[in-house]
Image (cartoon, rainbow, N blue to C red):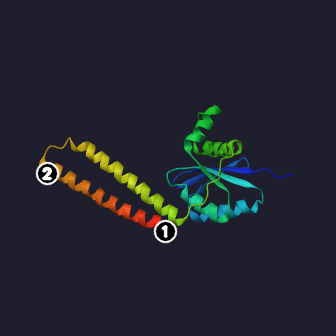
């Protein structure tokens, strides 16, 4: 008879991780040292397990980068999926401890696909895409405000500010092309 998989729910924030497994919750620093120590502790359990966390705009990266080298199965899910799961169970309360427990429950119930490790090249491309998106959003915000600037001095300054993102965008395109050639 096979041992059931132990699901470890981890709620991620910038500084800390709220961990839930084996009916216990505890806090862990979101730093490489404490994460490596935690991965070693999980490996010592010698039971099948899977870590479940949410995508948090980058704060989950330290956890992913710590789990993958240890061969630890990890799944990074979209927060909306977990929130809908919580609502389907009638759970309206929200805090880090409850979220960690909910993530473990989500993993056990849904058994989402594992998140594969990303290569250095994939990370570079992802960072360039994120920066490109940020530049587009900023440029759009400035262009949308341009009509409210009536003085020539203000309009010249805005045009000067707008030329910076254009140069950066050309540079990003060149970097992406170089990275694509490495694929």
Residue at the image point whose x is 56% and y is 61% from the top? 118
- Locate residue 123 relative to residue 75 in the image: left or right: left
Q: Is residue 23 above or below residue 116?
A: above
- Locate residue 164 relative to residue 81 in the image: left or right: left
Q: Say which quarter of the image contains residue 109.
A: top right
Q: Say which quarter of the image contains residue 38.
A: bottom right
Task: Name the secondary structure under disc 1.
Answer: helix
Query: Residue 121's spot in the image, x, y percent?
Result: 51, 65
Residue at the image point whose x is 83% and y is 52% from the top? 2
Residue farthest to the front, as pictured? 181
Nearer-the-camera pick, 125 or 87 = 125
- Locate residue 73 relative to residue 80 in the image: left or right: right
Nearer-the-camera pick, 149 or 91 = 149
Query: Residue 176's spot in the image, x, y percent?
Result: 42, 62
Residue farthest to the left, as pictured? 152
- Mark 1 and mark 2 lie on one chain; the one further toward the N terminus is 2
Residue at the image point whose x is 58% and y is 45% from the top? 96
Task: Name the secondary structure under disc 2.
Answer: helix
Marking on residue 153: 2
Query: Residue 111's spot in the image, x, y percent?
Result: 69, 46
Q: Residue under circle 1?
A: 182
- Mark nearest the camera among 1 and 2 is 1
């Amino acid at each position: 008879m096979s041992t059931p998989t132990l699901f470890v729910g981890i709620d991620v924030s910038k500084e800390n991780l709220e961990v839930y497994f084996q009916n216990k919750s505890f806090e862990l620093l979101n730093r490489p040292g404490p994460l490596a120590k935690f991965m070693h502790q999980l490996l010592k359990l010698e039971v099948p397990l899977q870590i479940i966390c949410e995508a948090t705009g980058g704060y989950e990266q330290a956890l992913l980068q710590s789990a993958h080298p240890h061969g630890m199965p990890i799944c990074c899910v979209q927060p909306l999926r977990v929130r809908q799961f919580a609502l389907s169970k009638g759970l309206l309360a929200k805090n880090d401890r409850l979220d960690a427990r909910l993530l473990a429950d989500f993993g056990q119930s849904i058994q989402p696909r594992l998140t594969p490790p990303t290569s250095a090249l994939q990370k570079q491309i992802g960072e360039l895409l994120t920066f490109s998106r940020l530049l587009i959003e900023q440029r759009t915000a400035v262009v949308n405000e341009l009509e409210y600037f009536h003085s020539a001095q203000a309009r010249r300054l805005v045009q000067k500010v707008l030329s910076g993102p254009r140069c950066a965008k050309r540079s990003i395109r060149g970097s992406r092309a170089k990275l694509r050639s490495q694929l």
